Amino acid sequence: MKDIRSELKVLLDAEKVQNRIAELAVEISNDFKDKAVKIICVLRGGIFFTVDLTKKLDLIFDMDFVEISSYGNDQESSGNIVVKKDLTDTENLNEKHLIILEDIIDTGKSLKFLTEYLKKFNPLSVSSCVLLDKKSRRTENIVADYVGFVIPDKFIIGYGLDYCNYFRNVDYIGYLEN
Ligand code: IMP
Ligand code: MG
């Protein structure tokens, strides 16, 4: 893999990302105070966001992980979403408020699919929190309950988001100029 890090432009620096995550954590902590919460981290892109956000939540919760995919190595959603790694544990979901943590919402197909998938387990509620929202690209009728940043239509790399599955560890939100 070619090292593209020097070609990346900064859209949101690491400090901005962390400050916004702290604000989201306060909001979510207030909204779910005293509720039975389960965090659902969407792999793989959501892992960095999940780690940083959950450390700041003032709540008691358990966590599970799911991997869904439509992308392959392309930069466009195929719309054909599949569960690649299922939840580890689907018991007691009907006693929980589920909060999906996802890196980005683009067309909305992934989040819509996952929300519908989770609702089949009859949870008390399903909410979603995305770090990034490419709002102008939405084709599905879905909104995330918590949004870190609304961003322009650029291909994003960093902070969990990948380029051919590389560079997820870049600690800011970057993009490649077309
Ligand atoms: P959607 O189904 O079109 O909303 O796409 C959401 C998924 O596509 C995200 O979970 C990401 O994995 C991926 N994705 C969308 N936009 C980008 C991007 O700019 N960079 C990297 N991955 C992206
Ligand atoms: Mg993803």
Image (cartoon, rainbow, N blue to C red):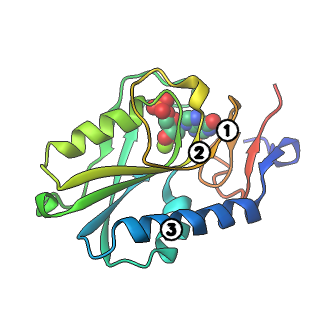
What residue is shown at x 88% (from left), y 47% (from top)? 6
Q: Quadrant of ligand 1?
A: top right
Instruction: In the rendered view, tell whether residue 94 sits above or below residue 18.
Output: above
Res 116 → quadrant: top left
The location of residue 46, given as percent across then percent down, is 49, 53
* Mark 2 C-beta to ligand 1 under 8 Å: yes
Residue closer to the observer: 96 or 89:
96
SS label for mark 3: helix
Residue closer to the observer: 1 or 32:
32
User: Which mark is first along the chain, 3 or 1?
Assistant: 3
The location of residue 157, given as percent across then percent down, is 69, 44
What residue is shown at x 68% (from left), y 50% (from top)? 158
Q: Which residue, given by chain and number where applicable, does mark 3 sit on?
A: 25
The location of residue 147, given as percent across then percent down, is 53, 48
Which numbered circle lies on residue 8? none
Res 31 → quadrant: bottom left
Q: Is residue 7 left or right of residue 95?
A: right
What residue is shown at x 41% (from left), y 24% (from top)? 140
3 or 2: mark nearer the eye: 3
Q: Which residue, given by chain and number where applicable, does mark 1 sit on?
A: 151
Q: Is residue 17 left or right of residue 71?
A: right
Residue contact between numbered discs 1 and 2, judged by CB atoms under 8 Å: yes
Q: Which residue, given by chain and number where applicable, does mark 2 sit on?
A: 132
SS label for mark 1: loop
Residue contact between numbered discs 3 and 2, judged by CB atoms under 8 Å: no
